[in-house]
Every structure is written in C-alpha cells, then in structure tokens.
C-alpha cells in the first residue's frame, strides 16, 4: 500500500508521511492470511537456507503482538503449518522489541544445551489493529514476517551479547488497550476503537531515541567494542528520523544503518529480522563482521544485540 493509496483513505499526503517518517509504502496481508501463515512462510525459507528439517526443530518462539488468537499460541499454528512435531511452542509479547527478546530466549535455551535447534520468528499482521480513521498511526505500520534458526555451533561467530530492558510505567503511551482482560471486547470497546493501536507519537519518538541509543552503547561496552568496529547497524525500522537521531547520539553515520523502512513501514516484531535478512542476502553484511541490532517498542521495551556474523 503506497502513500498515494493512503491518501484515498485518510487526510494525509505522500509528502507528509515521507518527510516525517521515511515511509513510501507498506505491505498489507490478504484478508484470509493470519500472522501464523506469514510466520510459517518465513520459517520454511529459513529452514531451507539452513538445511534444517522440520523434525529437527526443538523450540519455536514467535514474537508478535498480533497473534492469530489469544490462544493457542501462534507458535503452535506455525508448528502445525510446517510439521515441526518435536518442537515446544510459545509466543513472546514485547511489541516491536519482540524479535530481539525472542532471539535472546532462544540463545539461552541453545547455550544451556536444553535445545539443539530453535526457530525464532517475528511476525505481525499490524493492519488488523490499525484504526484506519487515525492518520497519526495508520500510515506508520505494515505487515510482515521473518525467521531465524539458532544452533550452538561452537564456531567463532554468533550472538556476543544482548541487552534487554523495559519500563512498564510508560505502558499507556503505546498500546492496544481493548480486547484483553482489562477491557474485554464489548460494543463500547469497538465504538471507541480500543481494539486498535493507540500511540502518543511525540513521546514515543523521544523514548525510542534515548533507549535505543543507550542500549546500543551498552551492548558495545559489554563487549569492549566501539561503533567503529561495527560494520552494519540494523535498527528497528519505525521511522527514518528516529534512526538519524540515534546515529547522532551514538556517533554512527547514516550509511552504517541498514534501512528498508521506506518499503515496509514499521512491521513491529518482524522489523529487525526482515531487515537483517535483506542485509545478509544483498551482501551488506559479510561473514566475520560485527552487526549491531537495536529495537524499541510498546511496554516500553527495548533491546540491543551485538552479533558476529
Ligand atoms: C507519529 C509521528 C510521525 C508524528 O510526527 P510529529 O511531527 O510528531 O507530528 P505531530 O503528532 O506533532 O502532528 C503534527 C500535525 O500533523 C498532523 N498529522 C498527523 N498525522 C498526519 C498524517 N498522516 N498526515 C498529515 N498530517 C498528519 C497532526 O494532526 C498535527 O496537526 P495539527 O498540528 O494541526 O494538530 C512522530 O511523532 C513519530 O514518528 N513518532 C514515533 C512513532 C513510532 O515510530 N512509533 C513506533 C515505535 S515502536
């Protein structure tokens, strides 16, 4: 869906959206396509790339804030779709930070030896939680999925550190307030569109910059690395202006960041892994290089991971 198409839905313009966010278009899943359908498609590609058979997978973690249903978990549906019959399955709720949180959960399981092969997925159908009458939010998000396989290989590469953080006192600033046990689905919830994403955009912007910059620096510090050692930064693809501001804070030129927000918008938990996948496929990341991933989302939650590729 292009900005021009959005102009037909809400009072906005390509100029406003692009200049404020860097977004030109986003993808919208088909009506009959749920989050687990996109997640399973990404999982199949990751398994093919890694040469992994479905029955080798011991754990599936799906990071999402748009699950197919309250339960069963989206991970259970993915298991069904891909036939990973030996896998334990769970979803992880950390909004846009979900993929890096899930990757660290997978890393912990794999590094203890409790799990040999973990399938970590970030997948979202954000289009179903958009208020398509609210121009301040509906222009920002898109649908998508990405997947990664984690194994302990003993090779001189992998996840060096992960920094995870949260501040639940600011939960009201970015949320889908209705439809859960606090405000169960009712006519009033629907009338007030409380089943849709609500956001205090300016506040979110400020906290996103501060927390992503700080967690990126903390991840580097833990490994005794500097920003100069990093070849590529994969930031949460929420807004190009947020990314520019992070660059200023951590002393990284814009060229060091991989950006695809222009083509996908903010795909929440899918954003980091979709960008990482693109960057790896198109040669932007090479073996042995340091890759810094950094993300922020509702909760608030944030995370940074330093990876040797
Ligand atoms: C949402 C965001 C782009 C808004 O940009 P902003 O410069 O802060 O804009 P404001 O919210 O102050 O709104 C400025 C004006 O633009 C208008 N506006 C909002 N959305 C608009 C749109 N899509 N098209 C045109 N005008 C719009 C507002 O109504 C307001 O008009 P007013 O001054 O007449 O009241 C920006 O705050 C942002 O990116 N925040 C972070 C969002 C994010 O990334 N969230 C996810 C993090 S995981």
Image (cartoon, rainbow, N blue to C red):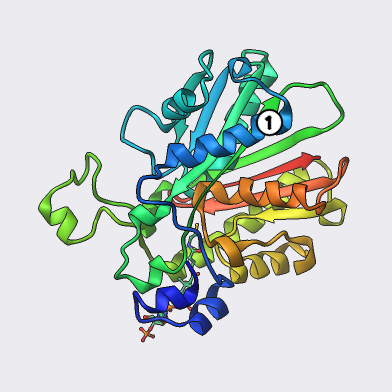
Q: Is residue 56 above or below residue 75?
A: above
- Residue nearer the viewer, 188 or 14: 14
For the point 24% across and 56% down, the residue is 194
Ligand 1 positioned in quadrant: bottom left
Residue picked out by circle 1: 48
- Residue nearer the viewer, 298 or 115: 115
- Residue nearer the viewer, 3 or 224: 3
Q: Is residue 127 above or below residue 114?
A: below
Give the quadrant of residue 51.
Answer: top right
Can residue 172 be seen in the rendering of this structure?
Answer: no
Q: Is residue 278 left or right of residue 23?
A: right
For the point 34% across and 27% down, the residue is 72
Where is residue 67 drawn, in percent x and y?
Answer: 38, 39
Q: Is residue 8 left or right of residue 167?
A: left
For the point 65% across and 27% down, the residue is 107
Can residue 40 be seen in the rendering of this structure?
Answer: yes
Q: Which quadrant, please, contains the C terminus?
A: top right
For the point 40% across and 67% down, the residue is 137
Label 1, residues with CA under 10 Å away: few <14, some 14-19, many ≥20: few
Where is residue 186 drawn, in percent x and y?
Answer: 13, 48
């Amino acid at each position: 869906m292009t900005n021009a198409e959005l102009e037909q839905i809400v009072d906005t313009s390509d100029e406003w959206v692009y200049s404020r966010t860097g977004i030109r278009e986003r993808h919208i899943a088909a009506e009959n396509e749920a989050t687990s359908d996109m997640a399973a498609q990404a999982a199949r590609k990751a398994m093919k790339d890694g040469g992994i058979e479905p029955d080798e997978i011991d754990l599936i973690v799906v990071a999402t804030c748009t699950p197919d249903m309250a339960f069963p978990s989206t991970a259970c549906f993915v298991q069904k779709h891909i036939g990973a019959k030996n896998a334990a399955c769970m979803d992880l709720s950390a909004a846009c930070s979900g993929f890096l949180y899930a990757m660290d959960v997978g890393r912990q399981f794999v590094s203890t030896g409790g799990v040999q092969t973990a399938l970590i997925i970030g997948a979202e159908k954000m289009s179903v939680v958009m208020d398509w009458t609210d121009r301040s939010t509906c222009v920002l998000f898109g649908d998508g999925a990405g997947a990664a396989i984690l194994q302990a290989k003993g090779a001189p590469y992998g996840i060096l550190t992960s920094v995870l953080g949260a501040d639940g006192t600011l939960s009201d600033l970015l949320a889908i307030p209705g439809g859960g046990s606090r405000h169960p689905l009712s006519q009033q919830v629907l009338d007030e569109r409380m089943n849709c994403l609500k956001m205090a955009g300016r506040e979110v912007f400020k906290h996103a910059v501060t927390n992503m910059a700080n967690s990126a620096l903390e991840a580097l510090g833990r490994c005794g690395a500097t920003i100069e050692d990093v070849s590529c930064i994969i930031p949460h693809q929420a807004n190009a202006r947020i990314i520019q501001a992070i660059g200023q804070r951590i002393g990284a030129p814009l060229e060091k960041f991989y950006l695809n927000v222009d083509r996908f918008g903010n795909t929440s938990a899918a954003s980091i892994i979709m960008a990482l996948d693109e960057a790896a496929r198109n040669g932007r990341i090479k073996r042995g290089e340091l890759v810094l991933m950094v993300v922020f989302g509702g909760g608030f939650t944030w995370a940074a991971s330093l990876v040797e590729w």
